[in-house]
Image (cartoon, helix red, strand yellow):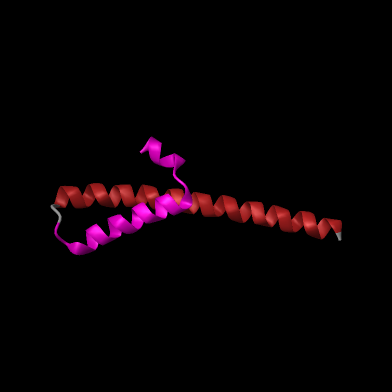
Amino acid sequence: MAKDTNLSYEQARTALEEIVTQLESGNLALEETLKLWEKGEQLALICQNILDSAQERLEALTEDEEEED
């Protein structure tokens, strides 16, 4: 999964959406379902980390603007 840490938010979200679609189909063997679930968890974490970072950047920019006023 190390290579996935270089994904953009959009790439990770798209991959996660594809996994959800596969899981919702219900046509997978148990082992494949578990593997996809684990990958989905990792992708969700990547997305959350990117969103958290973006929020921190926005908050820092907002603070800088308030200090300038």
Q: Of residues 1 and 13, which is closer to you in this image?
A: 13
**Residue 24 falls within the magenta-colored stretch:** yes
**Residue 4 falls within the magenta-colored stretch:** yes
**Which residue shows up at 20% across the image and 52% down it?**
33
**Which residue shows up at 70% across the image and 53% down it?**
60
Name the quadrant of the N terminus: top left
Image location (x, y in percent) of residue 10: 45, 54
The number of callouts visible is 0
Name the quadrant of the C terminus: bottom right
**Which residue shows up at 26% across the image and 50% down it?**
36
Left or right: 42 with respect to 21?
right
Left or right: 24 with respect to 48?
left
Could you tell me what secondary structure mostly forms the magenta stretch?
A: helix
Q: Which residues are magenta?
A: 1-27
Query: Which residue is at the far right?
Result: 69
**Which residue shows up at 29% across the image and 59% down it?**
20
Image location (x, y in percent) of residue 63: 75, 56
Instruction: Judge whether 45 appears above or below 23 on screen.
Output: above
Left or right: 22 with respect to 43?
left
Image location (x, y in percent) of residue 57: 65, 51
Instruction: Judge whether 21 appears above or below 2 on screen.
Output: below
Query: Which residue is at the far top?
Result: 2
Image location (x, y in percent) of residue 29: 13, 52
